[in-house]
Structures are given as structure tokens and as C-alpha cells.
Amino acid sequence: MRRWMAVLRTPVGTGAGLLLLGVLLLAVFAPILWSHQANAIDTDHLLQGTSADHWLGTDNLGRDIFYRVLVASRTSILLALLATSIAVVTGLALGSAPAILGKRGGRVATAVVNIAVAFPGLLLALFFAVVFGVGAKGAVLAIGFAGAPSFARLTQTLVAGVAERDFIAAARIAGVGRFRMLVRHILPNIAEPLVVNATIGAGGTLLAFAGLSFIGLGVQPPAYDWGRMLGESLSGIYVHPAAALAPGVAVVIAGLAFNLFGEAVAKGLGAQVPRARWTDRTPEATPAREDDSDAVLVVEDLHVSFPGPVTPVRGVSFTIHKGEIVGVVGESGSGKSLTALAVAQLIEPPGQVRAAELSFLGAPLLGRLPVRSTAAVRRRLLGTSFAMVFQDPMTSFNPTKRIGVQLAEGAREHQGLTRRAAMDRAIDRLRAVRVPAAERRARQYPHEFSGGMRQRAMIGMGLMGAPALIVADEPTTALDVTVQRQVLRLLETIRTEDDVAVLLISHDISVVAQICDRVLVMYAGRVVEDLPSTELATGARHPYTRALLAAVPDLDTALDEPLAVIPGRPVDPARLPEGCAFAARCAFASDRCRLEDPVLIDQVACWHPQAQAEYSNFRTGQR
Amino acid sequence: MTTQVTTAVNAPTLNAHPWLGFAVRRLGRLVGSVLILVSAAFLMIHLIPGDPVRGALGPAAAQSLVDAQRASLGLDDPLWQQYLDFLHHLVTGNLGTSITTGLPVSDVIRDRLPATVELAVAAFLVAVLIAVPLGLAMGVLTRGGRRPRAELGFTSTAVVLAAIPEFLLAVGLVYVFAVTLHWFPVAGRGNVASYVLPVLSLAVGPAAVLARICRVELLAVLQTDYLRTARAKRLPAAAIYLRHALPNAVTATITLGGLLLGGMVAGTVLVENVFGWPGLGSTIVSSIIAKDYPLVQGVVLVYGVGVLLVNLAVDVTLALLDPRSTIRES
């Protein structure tokens, strides 16, 4: 209830609420106040236009149209509400039938609803209007029953959603009967969306009812509602447009009042996240850097920020050389995947990337290029030499295109191959990543591939050109362990055969240790340690790296002891502490750690780097 | 959209012939729906309280006339016999005879159907041609929270337009463009100009809904992993939007567009009455008021079959655009 009041306090909620209140008050009081004026026949002023006596003129019996529109509000709204209640009650009965009748009866009810929903409401209303007869009563029943299927569908969906929840399962185990379950446990939990939809539905019903009355199948004379007034005055629209327009406007206003109020409530009850303002920052000056001809990727002081503002990546620097496999490890939220996306130029606005330097094969990647042709050159360079492998192979292929086509299109774009040649190359590349029956597989859709096969195909996509770098963002996380091994081997083979550099992002330090030459350990958007993977077992100096290593169980891990974990939680990039971000979770933290932020000196960013070879329960020999 | 059918490879029969399974299922559903529709149309007359013939001919009609009419409609036979006769007549294209005019119902429908089909098809084309490019363009322009004001203007305009029912819009359009500006005729079906207002009345509301959905769908597709893959291939923007985003964004749009087209078929009933359009819509209303039940039955059948055919067309189009849907639906 308090949330409903909160909705009423928003501008749209207040406006819609007042409008709806006004419409309802009019429906209650207009006939009491103005029935006399609305029905007074004035034979001296038939079908007159707008005048001081009659604001909107008179009808064919000289009755005042303005007052008739006001008085007609009760009939119009009352009948609409009646029809809505019929729709809701019938829909609720049909929709909750599966919950009460059990499997077989439920299936019949669902089938009926499915077929009925396929027919437009107006068609159903016409059908029922024939059965129930022309007139107000027939129209209420017709529109009510015609609206029932959509409410039934809504109820089914809501009930199905609630039925999955634990408390329902608990009640079922406790032996609560089906009917009692529905009334006591399910209905109270779906009441809110039902009421909201009934409110929106009432607006639609009002309009539908006006439609039926308009074509003469609804309210019959001498009674009148807005629809009938509109229908009767339509033929005279040339001479007396006000008589046709006034009831039309009334219908729209009343319909909108219900609609808007329902929508405002629906929106207010759903979670709304306020949009934070975006503050812009200027890039910092570029520091000089030693020349490195062997470097494939140079990253210097990379920042990625989002509106908030939050900066999940703050000052990452590293260089990858030809044929080198560099691993990046860290917990979720450490900024490792964003680092990968940023170097791949795949951060979408409102995200922002800035860096002192970001260059690939000597070409700068950041900044707007002055000439169009240079931008095209850059795109071609990235398109042929820079390959990406994403985390989830299940969702990273376009589901509506054949695998071969998806591999080939980059080659057609950047290498100017014909459709034929590109497809041959795609099949050849699928073979290179050991996809069996490559020719047949190329013609299949992604959903016909298993996860491991898709990840191979994804790597094959990267090999369409002549890649110098493969950025693999958690390429094995979504795969099972044996397939993981195969995919890692494949990356390793490609490195050895073609001298391709690999940037491998992973949260799994044992995966990284298996194939990487060098490991970057990230925490809270920074590189905290940079070390050769051969030294992981013995040479790790940062307490965080050691904690990550200690958390990996192996065959010697005692089964009766709890698994080692890193105490505390990763820091929230929106609330970074002063000093070292890891201090709160670190056993070695001192006052200095909480005040001063350590920088990466001698490959480790820590005020208290640990001595080498203190412990080494981690093994890299897992291959 | 992003959830995948991981079990697909384990279902050899469906995997080998996904289209066959799809066709069998879809035809089965069509036949079932048509049977229910036909039965409902048949039962309609019997659900009416009292004697339908007496109702149609009025209380003053002679009893002999009523009896003769009842006999000619076969209303005195047992119900199952009537049902079988009804089915038999349907198969042979005999929809009975209109009580009020004495003309065969099939002749009336043949006479009136083209005007309604023209109206619905023209309105559908106009709605799609306006809504899909507009919605996609708005999606591209407002992606990632860009241009919040344009988004607000677009969404609120679309919401208001979608809330106005077609017959009220029709009255408004007649007032502005026919009565005040004299650009188009008030009513009737004749030259091209006479089509403009009826088609617009039918098309504007669905177009507004469609454009909104189209934008939302495009925004959702722009967030997907496979679009990031397309960007990672460094394809030009046009290729990313047209080749990768569009086909995936329109699948949901088409599902909804089909529902809207079904709604448009029904919407013709009201719009035809505003414009005095000589189609099935004005026929069904006048025959309901005149209690000409054989004619009502025939027209209801035609409308119902029309809606079912539209739904079928939607499913087939979807299956062509998104090959997963042949397997996914069950």
C-alpha cells in the first residue's frame, strides 16, 4: 500500500490519479446534478450549433449536448467496469484452472485459452453479441467474455511464476489442498499485477464498449452512452461537428485516465533505477615510452569508466610481445574483462576508455582519426590481425546465421574475398581448429553446435585473417573440464605454429598457470602483480596472489578441512577505500596500507611484499 | 532470445527434419482451430435464446412463414444431423441463404470480401512501412541512453496514438481532413483518395505500437553477445545493424505485427462503419442488427479463417527468419 502511495506522489502518478478521480466523480454525480438539463427537449432549437445557452449545441430533439456528454459518463463507465469485472473473474477462473483441476483438466483449459487468445477481442465480442443479443446487457457480457482470454493468459503466466517458488513447494509438501493453495497462497501473490492490468484493461474496455455502441450493437435508445452519441451524430458531422467530436473526446479522456493510471502504477511498482549523471574527464598527458619493436599490444595507464561515475579499470599498464601468452587473473569485478574489451575497442558508450597509450602493432587505437581513410585502415587492421574469443560460446554467435557465413563475412569485408573464396577459407579454418566434418558444419546454425565446438569455431573466426593477437575473455569458463583442456591446447598450438600472441583472461589461476608465459594479477581495477607463470608456485609476493593460489584445492588438500577462501568481499568499484584496495582483506595490512595507495614497483604493488618461497602448495604441473 | 536449445543435437528425428516436424505440428493446430471455429459458428445459432427464425422475421410474421423458414434452414432436424449437414455444406462452399435478402451468403461474401481485404492489407503495409524503419532508427539513435529527449517525445507520442481506438481516430481524421480541409472524401469507396482516411485510421494505432516494440527489440539485440562478436569482426556499422541486428530484432516485431494484423482484420468492422465502406464489416453489423443469422455465421467464419491464416503466415515467416523457432516451439 505504501508503494502505491509513492506512485501517486510521482508527477505522472499524481496527474493520472487526479484525472481518474475526476472521471469517477463525474460518473457518480453528473446524472444527479444534470439529468434534467440533459433530457430537457427544446423543439425550438433543434440541431443547433454552439451558442451561449448550449455550449456544444443541441441534438435532433433540441437536447443540450454538453450536459448529455457529462451525464453519459455514468452509463459509459459503469458498463465498462461491469464488463471488466466479468473479464477479470472469467479470466481468473480459466487461468487458474490448471492449478485447481490438475494436469489433464488444466491442459484443456490452457488449450481453450490458447485458441481464444489468437482471435482479436472485437471478433469475439461480435460473436458473443450475436449470442447474447443486441443491447447493453448483451454488450457487457460480450465484451466481458471477449476480454477474458487475455486475462486468463496473464493469470496463467503469473500463477506459473509463483508456483515455482519455494513457499508454494513447502505448502504442497505440507499437504495444502489445491483450492486452498490457490486462494491462500497463490492469489495474494499475483493480486498486484492483476489489479494493475485490470485498471489498464478497464481503459481498453471503455473504448471497446464505445465501439460496440457506436455501431449500434451496444446501448439502445432511449438510454445513451458516449459511443451511441458518437454514432448518432456521425452522419451530421458536416453541419454539426461538435456533436460528434465531444463524446469522442470524452471517451479518449476517460480511457486515457484508466490507462495512464494503470501504467503509472505498473511502472512505479517495478524497480526503477534512477539514471546517474555522467561526469566527463579529460585525458591525461602522454608520458614517453621506450620503443619496443617486438610489441604486439602496448597498454599504458588504461582507464575504463562508466556513468556514476565508477572507474572499474584504473591505470592498467602492460605490453604483450609476439608469440607471448599473457594471462590476466582476478576475482569477478577486478576489471579484467573490461580491460580485455577496452583493448579490443569494444566498450560501448556510455562507457569511456582513456589511456596514456593504447597501440596495436604500432598503430594507436584511441582517439578520433582526422581522416576517414585512416579510420578504415584501422578497422581493417583490427579486422584481420586482432581476434576476439568471448566467454559464452552459446550466445556469442548470431542465432539466425549459419556458422560458415559468420566466419566468412569478416574475410569478405576486410580481405575482399568473394563469397566462394571466403566460404572455402572458413571451412579451411574450421578444419584448422579441428572441427570434424567442417564442410557440413559450416552450413549449420549455431544451435546445432555443442559449446566446445562453438568455442572452436569462435577461435576459427579469429584465424580467418592473419592474427597477431588473440584476446580470449574467459574462453573456457562456460565449458566442462575436458573441453576446457582441449580449447586451451588449441590456443597453445596456434601460438606455437603462427607466433600469435594471446591475452588470456580468466578467474581461474590454475587455467592461466597451465599455458601462460606471464601472469598479471588484477585487483580492484589495477594490476597488483606481474610475474612469470613459472614463478607462480614459488615467487608470488603479493598477498592477494598468494591468497588466490592458496584457494585452489589440489589432490593433497585435506578433505576434512574447509576449503581455503579469501576473507571479505571484492571491493565495490563505486566505493574504493583510501590506500590499498586490498588492505581490508589482507593479513599483512598496516596503517600505511590504509592510507597510501601502493603502485606497481618491481612488478608488485604492495607495501609489504612477501618473501619468496614461503609456501608452495600450488603446482603448475597439471598438464 | 539468448537462451539456446542445448538438447537439439540429442533429438535426431527433429534435428534431421525440423521442417517436417514444424509443418505437422502447425497444420495440426490449424485444423484444430478451424474445427473449433466452425463448431462455434454452428453453435452460435443454437445458443441464441428463443427461436432465431422468429427473432429474424419479427413477432408479426405468420407462423407458416416461420415454419417454412425453419424447415429450409433444417432447424427441426436433430442437432448432430444439422452439424453434419453444416459441415457438408461448408465443404461444398454452400454457406446458406440470407434470411433478409434471400441471396446466397457465399455471393454476398464474394461481393464484399475484396473491399475489406484491400483495406486491411493496405493498412498493414502502411503500418509496417512506417513503424519498422521508424522504430529501428529510433533504436539506433537512442541506444545506450543517447538523446533522452527524443526518446521521451517518441515514446509518449506513440503511447497516446496507440491508446486512441481506430473508430475515434477515424472520426477525428474525417473532421480534420474531410470536413474542414476538404482534402479527402468523407465516406465511400472510389478513387485512391477515398482510401487514405480509412487506411490511416486502421494503420496509425498499430504503427505506434509496432514502432515502440521495434525500438525496444533493437535495443535488446544491441546488448547481445553476438552483436559484440559482430563488432569484434570490425564490420561497418551498416552491416552490423542491417545484417546482424535487424533479422533478430524483427522476429518479435513480426510476432506482434501478426497479432496487430489480426486486430486490423477485426478493426475493419468499426472503420467500415465510419466510412460507409462496402465490405464485410458493415455487412456483419447490419446482419447482426437484422438478426440475419446465416449471413452472420458466414461472415464470422470468413473473419475467423482470415485471422487463423494470418497467424499461420506469421509462424511460417518466423520459422524462415529464425531457424531455431522450428525446434523451439512445442
Image (cartoon, rainbow, N blue to C red):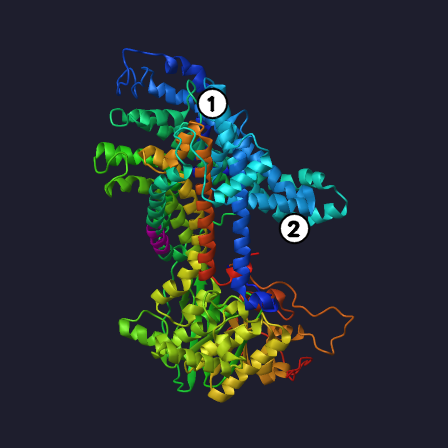
Q: Is residue A352 above or below residue B280?
A: below
Q: Are marks 2 and 1 in contact (CB under 8 Å)?
A: no
Name the one closer to the observer, A98 or A162: A98
Which percent across, then down, holds residue A28? 47, 21
Q: Quadrant of residue A231?
A: top left
Residue A164 is tagged as 2
> Is A73 above or below relative to A317?
above
Residue that appears at 34% across and 12% down: A41
Quadrant in the rendering for residue A303 = bottom left
Q: Is residue B24 above or below residue A48?
A: below
Q: What residue span does the magenta drawing correspond to?
A: B129-138
At x 49%, y 63%, the residue is B323
Q: What kind of element bears circle 2?
A: loop
Is residue B135 a member of the stretch shown in magenta? yes
Disc 1 target residue: B65
Question: What residue type is disc 1 on?
Answer: Leu
Q: Position of residue B225 (x, y in %)?
A: 48, 65
